[in-house]
Image (cartoon, rainbow, N blue to C red):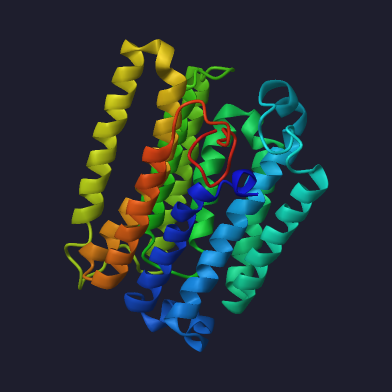
Amino acid sequence: MLQLTRLGFTLAAVSNCWVMLFLAVSLEPESRLNEDLSRWSLGLLLLFAAAVAAGLHGYGAALNDLLDVRRDRLLHPRRPLPSGRLSVQQAVGIAVLCLLVAILAAVAMGTGPVLVCLLTAAGILFYNLTGKHLPATGIVMLGLIRMVGMFIPNPQLGFAWPVVLAMTHTTFAAAVVYRLEDKRPRLRPSERGGIFAGWAFWTLVLLGWMSVFDGMNLPNEPLVWVGPAVAAAIFAAGSWAFLYRAQRRPGGRTALAGYYARGSTAWLVAYDATWLLSSGQWWPGILHLALLATACASVLAYRPGQDEGRDELPYVVST
């Protein structure tokens, strides 16, 4: 069950929901705060947000394996479903249970979170049925799913720069993994243009959203950009190093892709931690640093050739 739901990747999804919850509670004006959040303590809200994120992630992972079970019988016979360690009926039950957990946790946070949760689930379903078979569409969809999922705790939030950064990171990293794995069909110039156009469109949508809700900046937090900018620079340098190494050692690209996919997912937690620390929220930032340490430990524990990983997986950066 843990292999099927890819529990090791869940931390990034949980972290993304938590950072938006912390920002909503501490920095958003009351006019932009989800009123239903005031009914619960912060501890319960963190529990609800974690349940939504983990439930959607498990739903997407199980759905992905169910739809690919015939192909996996030929190409990856050791995975849970083709190996017989889990039956198709059990996998269906796990997918349904994960989705129900996500919806029920969203219900506790109000009508808006429920609608956004259902929209995210619909995006995951579309990705698994259609999007992952179209390289450019699938890569953009991964960023879009990440973007929509972060709005679940407080759909009317105004300061959406963490969402912009996470969506950009996911889209870019998915394209890099696609190249490292040398997948077919290869990304042609038109498809690369389509990826850029899709990213640019949704970035403009988010910028327009922030303009409407007057959330382009935080006047009382002038240093809020410092940490995320440093984290983004480190990730860019690391990506360049991976691509350079892949060109020098083309035979080891599959292993590099596995490390890069896991490392890129873990680095989403680093962004969240830096947003919080740069805005002066120390204990939430330290909490996210602990999540980051756990996520990095899972990356270091990865060994090329492990069969529990997947490629076409929403809430993970790889397509």
Q: Is residue 155 left or right of residue 93?
A: left
- The residue nearer to you, when weighing 115 against 197, is 115
x, y percentage for residue 290? 32, 59
Q: Is residue 88 above or below residue 77?
A: below
Q: Is residue 213 left or right of residue 145?
A: left
Q: Is residue 6 above or below residue 105?
A: above
x, y percentage for residue 137? 58, 34
- The residue nearer to you, when weighing 166 against 273, is 273
**Image quarter of the C terminus:** top right
Residue plotted at (27% across, 65% down):
286
In which quadrant of the rendered view does residue 134 lie?
A: top right
Q: Is residue 317 above or below residue 157?
A: above
In the image, farthest residue toward the right: 89
In the image, farthest residue toward the front: 85
- The residue nearer to you, when weighing 169 against 8, is 8
In which quadrant of the rendered view does residue 247 lie?
A: top left
x, y percentage for residue 107? 64, 75
Residue plotted at (57% across, 36% down):
308
Residue 269 in sight? no
